[in-house]
């Protein structure tokens, strides 16, 4: 049976009386921290979830998982100082077209160097590569939506959703008609695996600096009113439970007040009270909204310019620019980092991405396609966090108004058209049923030395499925368009 035939058997019909199922979901979510905070920080709601895991082709799932270590390696090499300033040249060119964000990050990176080098050569990446299923010619493959190098989210909540779906299936909560084999509803171990990544970096810091384990801590840099704080907390608690490592949470701006830099043996070390900070884990700073004043940029520089390992460094954050993703679709560029024999699993996930505002052949082609066939494309700026893209018919009008000197801050990407699946989404206790689209994220953890490119640790660390109603262009869960799902492998 093909995937298309299999999904015809979906949706799984709901039991005649839905009350017990919905109650079961909510109680499980509250009991297990599958929750998000609300505008009132003293109140939580269950995270938006699908009732059933979405059917997902096993081959696409496996291919996505298998590509991850290669992508981890690729992005560690891009953000090392061993590649003839490959990234420097790209960002140098990109910065003037986006001075308020890319430009400021670039300036921050350069100011953080001492004698042209980072104070801490080790960098930690908690990455997430996102895919949609492409179904050209009936052949199903994962196509990469984007590669995230900063503040990747939902590594905490996704583990919980897979466990919730397994629990519902095991207890018969879906009713007699819904038969799931638990072997086909895999768990996502991202909580423990991502926490393990932070622990590896912490241990590397302790080994490197002779710091006492009892007097070191991880510093999580978080937004002040973060609704997705519970997602982050799961990693923090696991870091404590499994590794005995304490995490302190501060906002970027607060950090300059509650931490200090002490100069020991000629090295600037970051301290939170008496604890030497081993790793600074950034869940803030991925958007220009997080930098309303110069003091915020100063704080980001302050956090960068010391011995603590950064997850990620500003340089690694810049490597995640959508411009970089576009340039890597040129095979000759990719071959600068990955050998011919290893590029297959990576290239197979690429769709066409074109530069804008360039006199090159690609640039001219993009300009023409944006005018003549906009319905096939999405236009993306150098931004993260959802809600920033321009879609289809909106592209020509948008470009018309965009000053020419800002065009090169955008890329034009072919739209991926994943299969549509009927599912039920539960959001704040309210049930929505309809056609949905899904995006798979694969987490990866890599610890490397940016001075010599040596990789100390490289792992695939779980996955995430986000699902949105087909009627919405974007699937941001935090932004309010989508929900967290699990996979039912078929
Ligand atoms: P961000 O860094 O803001 O998350 P993305 O590149 O992930 O930016 O785009 C946001 C959303 O837009 C994605 O989650 C997806 O729903 C949609 N999207 C982006 N690129 C494509 C594409 N090529 N085809 C289909 N949908 C896309
Ligand atoms: Mg992103
Ligand atoms: Mg995204």
Image (spheres, rainbow, N blue to C red):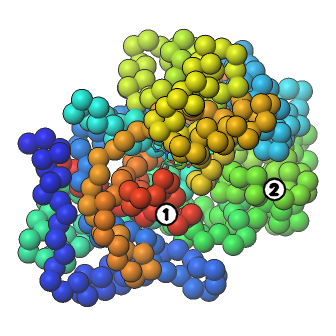
Residue 348 or residue 167, whichever sits in front: 348
Horizontal and vertical percent position of residue 450: 68, 29
Residue 296 or residue 305, whichever sits in front: 296
- Kindly indicate whether the residue at mark 2 contacts the one at mark 1 (C-beta within 8 angstroms): no
The answer for how far apart the CA atoms under marks 1 and 2 are is: 25 Å
The answer to which image quadrant residue 175 occupies is bottom left
Horizontal and vertical percent position of residue 167: 25, 72
Q: Residues within 10 Å of mark 1 (few under 14, many from 20)?
A: some
- Can residue 435 be seen? yes
**Residue at (73, 41) in percent of width and height:** 401
Position above or below: 89 against 416: above
**Residue at (65, 64) in percent of width and height:** 247
Q: Which residue is under mark 1?
A: 481
Horizontal and vertical percent position of residue 13: 16, 71
Q: Which residue is under mark 2?
A: 291
Horizontal and vertical percent position of residue 232: 57, 64
Residue 67 or residue 399, whichever sits in front: 399
Position above or below: 126 against 465: above
């Amino acid at each position: 049976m093909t995937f298309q035939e299999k999904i015809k058997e979906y949706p799984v019909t709901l039991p005649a009386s839905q009350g017990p199922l919905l109650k079961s979901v909510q109680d499980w979510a509250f009991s297990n921290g599958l929750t998000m905070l609300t505008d009132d920080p003293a109140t939580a709601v269950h995270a938006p979830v699908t009732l059933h895991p979405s059917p997902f082709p096993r081959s696409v799932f496996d291919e996505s998982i298998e590509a991850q270590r290669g992508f981890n390696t690729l992005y560690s090499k891009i953000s090392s100082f061993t590649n003839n300033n490959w990234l420097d040249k790209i960002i140098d060119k990109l910065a003037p077209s986006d001075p308020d964000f890319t430009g400021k990050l670039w300036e921050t990176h350069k100011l953080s160097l001492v004698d042209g080098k980072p104070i801490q050569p080790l960098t930690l990446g908690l990455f997430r590569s996102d895919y949609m299923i492409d179904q050209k010619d009936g052949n199903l493959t994962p196509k990469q939506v984007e590669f995230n190098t900063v503040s990747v989210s939902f590594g905490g909540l996704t583990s919980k959703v897979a466990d919730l779906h397994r629990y519902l299936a095991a207890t018969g909560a879906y009713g007699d008609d819904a038969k799931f084999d638990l072997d086909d509803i895999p768990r996502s171990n991202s909580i423990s695996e991502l926490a393990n990544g932070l622990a590896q970096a912490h241990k590397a810091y302790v080994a490197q600096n002779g710091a006492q384990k009892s007097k070191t801590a991880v510093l999580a840099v978080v937004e002040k009113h973060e609704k997705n704080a519970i997602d982050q907390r799961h990693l923090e608690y696991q870091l404590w439970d499994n590794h005995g490592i304490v995490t302190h949470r501060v906002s970027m701006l607060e950090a300059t007040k509650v931490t200090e830099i002490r100069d020991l043996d000629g090295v600037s070390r970051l301290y939170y009270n008496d604890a030497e900070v081993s790793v600074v884990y950034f869940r803030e700073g991925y958007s220009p909204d997080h930098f309303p004043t110069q003091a915020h940029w100063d704080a980001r520089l302050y956090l960068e310019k010391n011995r603590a390992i950064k997850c990620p460094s500003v340089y690694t954050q810049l490597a995640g620019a959508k411009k970089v993703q576009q340039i890597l679709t040129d095979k000759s560029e990719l071959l600068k980092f990955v050998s011919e024999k290893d590029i297959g699993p990576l290239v197979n996930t690429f769709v066409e991405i074109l530069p804008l505002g360039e006199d090159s052949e690609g640039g001219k082609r993009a300009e023409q396609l944006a005018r003549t066939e906009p319905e096939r494309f999405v236009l993306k700026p150098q931004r993260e966090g959802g809600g920033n893209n321009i879609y289809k018919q909106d592209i020509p009008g948008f470009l018309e108004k965009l000053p020419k000197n800002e065009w090169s801050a955008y890329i034009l990407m072919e739209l991926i058209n994943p299969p549509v699946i009927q599912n039920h989404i539960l959001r704040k206790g309210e049930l929505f049923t309809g056609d949905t689209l899904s995006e798979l994220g694969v987490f990866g953890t890599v610890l490397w030395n940016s001075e010599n490119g040596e990789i100390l640790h490289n792992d695939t660390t779980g996955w995430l499925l986000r699902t949105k109603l087909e009627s919405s262009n974007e699937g941001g869960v935090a932004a309010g368009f989508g929900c967290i799902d699990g996979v039912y492998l078929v």
